[in-house]
Amino acid sequence: MFVLRKITDLAQHYLELVINPGSRVIDATAGNGYDTEFLARQVGPQGHVYAFDIQAEALKRTAERLRKSNLIDRVTLYETGHEEMSRLIEEPVSAVTYNLGYLPGGDHNLVTRNETTIESLNQALELLITGGLVVITMYPGHAEGNLEKQKLLSFCSKLQAIEFTVVHMNLLNLLSSPPELLIVQKNHFKQKMKA
Ligand SMILES: C[S@@+](CC[C@H](N)C(=O)[O-])C[C@H]1O[C@@H](n2cnc3c(N)ncnc32)[C@H](O)[C@@H]1O
């Protein structure tokens, strides 16, 4: 069942809209592999997922999950930062997803950092096909996560409106600092719209 409060459900909802059988997509933060597995199912046997993580432990967990669900052949795992994506991936992609922060059940000091996240986002926007989406789950509940969110909002608010549409979603009636969603689409209507 779709749960609006679960930001991962919202992220997957939007990803589903642009991923088709045969699509090429990127999981920029593989972690425990839940998102990689979701993407691998969406792209089907003809599609492909490129998944990044800086931690060997994360990629081990992701690979185990994919092996169990018989999806490992649809995925290339890179043990390196997502800021390397444009060096490693040449083909255009339909979607790039980021689930920022630290590895659940891992070292909480090994978090995504705003400088490399933005460097990578710049590359992701280049790799994206027209109509494709970058979907970012942000965690402002910890200090680096909050800084990363502010930097991402600032970066995305300066993207040319003629080229990109940016949406920021958050849960308004919760007291803590719940995760938030940032979605960027490469526009279809570049020639028609005035910025
Ligand atoms: C919240 S977890 C991702 C959860 C994952 N999407 C899932 O479905 O389980 C964030 C991950 O980002 C990874 N990470 C941190 N910096 C990174 C970077 N520069 N490039 C790629 N991954 C990075 C961390 O090692 C961690 O595993």
Image (tube, rainbow, N blue to C red):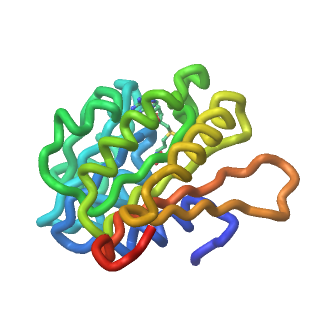
The image quadrant where one finds ligand 1 is: top left
Viewer-nearest residue: 28 or 56 = 28
Percent across and percent down for residue 2 are 58, 75
As drawn, which residue projects farthest toward the right? 175
Q: Is residue 37 above or below residue 57?
A: below
Viewer-nearest residue: 139 or 166 = 166
Viewer-nearest residue: 107 or 89 = 89
Percent across and percent down for residue 138 are 59, 46
Quadrant into which the N terminus falls: bottom right
Q: Is residue 166 above or below residue 153?
A: below
Q: Identify which residue is drawn at 33% across, 51% down.
A: 125
Q: Which quadrant would residue 171 be assigned to in this image?
A: bottom right
Left/right of residue 65 with respect to residue 167 in the rendered view: left
Percent across and percent down for residue 80 are 30, 27
As drawn, which residue projects farthest toward the front? 194
Left/right of residue 19 with respect to residue 139 in the rendered view: left
Q: Identify which residue is drawn at 64% across, 28% down.
A: 144
Quadrant into which the C terminus falls: bottom left
Percent across and percent down for residue 88 are 17, 36
Left/right of residue 8 with respect to residue 49 in the rendered view: right
Left/right of residue 22 with respect to residue 125 in the rendered view: left
Q: Identify which residue is drawn at 45% across, 35% down.
A: 117
Q: Is residue 33 above or below residue 132?
A: above
Q: Is residue 101 above or below residue 73?
A: above
Q: Identify which residue is drawn at 59% across, 36% down.
A: 148
